[in-house]
Image (tube, coloured by chain):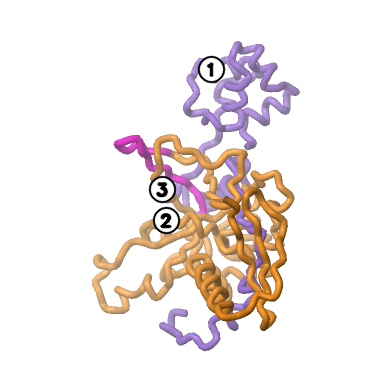
Chain colours: A purple, B orange
């Protein structure tokens, strides 16, 4: 997972181990925070400050940008949607990824066109499709 | 393989809610406290979806509500959405629930397994071969679909039918982006049938068709662990593959 912290570590040519050495934290702790396994909002302020100091940035620089929440009245509908598309669909702050849904077994029905599949099926409500 | 112009349609803000509407939503699910999605050990059987980092709300007895903020696809049939309205019921008595499937974009998909067979085959996803997903093609410029939006692309994605949950009508209406085209709604309906019933139906029919036939050949496929797949061919030329569990 790409977080602000992993980007900063990479930009500065550091590693989990080097950050751990500078902060006195365990490398595993740094890795879990960097990969998002331990979300940044569950890390103590002191630890965030230590990591920020080791990277030469401010603690605020490590905080992930907040998602625009659905229905947020502070934003217009178009602003909510455009921010959400950038953050959620394109993943500039990519959270945990999904496994692929692909299955190894093929299913002949997957290749049947909808018109053929529903041929002969009585329409329930022709007006609404 | 569908393209965006074939799969989507523009939806006016005041248009009626319909099956195939796509909206930005918060989706809730309950789980045991801190229960995590599968890690690096890929589960080839369950294929439990791993959702992005959710917000959580603690419940009693070691349980919690996990809330995912993501785009979702309405799968409730339009006839059901309008059923009470068409019967003349007052709006206050319309069922407020819509069933939606979370939308998983390509930039979020990563293979967890390390076997050659478990690959992110977007050709297969785009052909809607997996039963648990509906392919959603990319759009080069969403402003063509919604003039209020800036020019921006929409990545190809899939609606994950394993993660269905319910949201209120008003949530869909507030942040609705676009809808599926009438033609592509047929593909959604086909996928829903496949996901919920087809596998059982297919097995039943295949097995029934083999009753009374003589098996003329049995070809074992490559074993996986303690499982062995065997392709059986009947005297009428029909075939079925069964999986045997070694004990």
- Residue named by callout 1: A47
Element carrying mark 1: helix
Whether tag 3 and tag 1 are in contact, CB under 8 A, the answer is: no
Residue shown at the point (29%, 36%) measured from the top left:
B60
Element carrying mark 3: strand
Work out whether residue B227 can be spotted.
yes
Magenta-span inclusion, residue B68: yes
Q: Chain of mark 2?
A: B
* Numbered label attached to residue B29: 3
Q: Position of residue B178 (x, y in %)?
A: 53, 64
The quadrant in which residue A20 appears is: top right
Residue shown at the point (37%, 38%) measured from the top left:
B57
- Mark 1 is surrounded, within 10 Å at the Cα level, by few (under 14), some (14 to 19) or many (20 or more) other residues, namely some
- The residue nearer to you, when weighing B228 against B68, is B228
* Residue stretch in magenta: B56-72
Whether tag 3 and tag 2 are in contact, CB under 8 A, the answer is: yes
- Residue named by callout 2: B165
The quadrant in which residue B206 appears is: bottom right
Residue B207 to residue B145: above or below: below
Relative side of A47 to B57, left or right? right
Element carrying mark 2: strand
Q: Who comes first in sequence, dot 3 or dot 2? A: 3
Residues behind callouts 2 and 1 on a single chain: no
Q: Main secondary structure of the magenta part?
A: strand
Please identify, in this view, whether the residue under mark 2 or under mark 1 is nearer the observer: 2
Q: Position of residue B225 (x, y in %)?
A: 65, 48
- The residue nearer to you, when weighing B188 against B179, is B188
Q: Chain of mark 3?
A: B
Q: Chain of mark 1?
A: A
């Amino acid at each position: 997972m790409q977080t602000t912290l992993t980007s900063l570590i990479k930009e500065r040519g550091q590693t989990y181990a080097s950050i751990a050495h500078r902060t006195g934290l365990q490398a595993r702790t740094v890795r879990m925070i960097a990969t998002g396994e331990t979300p940044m909002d569950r890390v103590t302020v002191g630890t965030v400050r230590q990591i920020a100091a080791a990277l030469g940035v401010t603690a605020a620089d490590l905080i992930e940008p907040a998602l625009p929440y659905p229905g947020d009245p502070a934003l217009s509908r178009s602003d909510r949607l455009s921010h959400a598309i950038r953050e959620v669909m394109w993943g500039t702050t990519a959270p945990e990824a999904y496994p692929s849904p692909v299955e190894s077994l093929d299913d002949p029905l997957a290749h049947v066109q909808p018109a053929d599949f529903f041929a002969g099926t009585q329409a329930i409500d022709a007006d609404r499709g | 393989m569908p393209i965006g112009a074939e799969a989507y349609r523009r939806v006016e803000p005041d248009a009626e809610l319909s099956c195939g509407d796509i909206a930005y939503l918060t989706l809730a699910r309950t789980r045991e406290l801190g229960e995590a999605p599968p890690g690096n050990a890929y589960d080839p059987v369950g294929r439990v979806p791993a959702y992005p980092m959710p917000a959580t709300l603690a419940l009693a007895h070691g349980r919690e509500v996990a809330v995912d903020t993501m785009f979702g696809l309405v799968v409730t049939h339009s006839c059901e959405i309008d059923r009470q309205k068409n019967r003349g019921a007052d709006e206050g008595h319309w069922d407020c629930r819509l069933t939606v499937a979370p939308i998983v974009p390509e930039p979020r998909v990563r293979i967890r397994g390390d076997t050659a067979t478990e690959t992110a085959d977007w050709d297969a996803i785009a052909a809607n071969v997996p039963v648990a997903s509906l392919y959603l093609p990319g759009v080069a410029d969403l402003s063509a679909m919604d003039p209020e939006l800036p020019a921006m692309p929409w990545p190809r994605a899939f609606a994950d039918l394993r993660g269905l949950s319910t949201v209120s009508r008003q949530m869909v209406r507030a942040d609705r982006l676009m809808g599926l085209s009438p033609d592509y709604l047929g593909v959604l309906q086909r996928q829903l049938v496949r996901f919920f019933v087809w596998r059982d139906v297919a097995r039943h029919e295949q097995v029934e068709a083999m009753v009374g036939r003589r098996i003329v050949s049995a070809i074992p496929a490559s074993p996986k662990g303690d499982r062995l797949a065997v392709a059986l061919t009947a005297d009428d030329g029909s075939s079925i593959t069964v999986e045997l569990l070694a004990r």
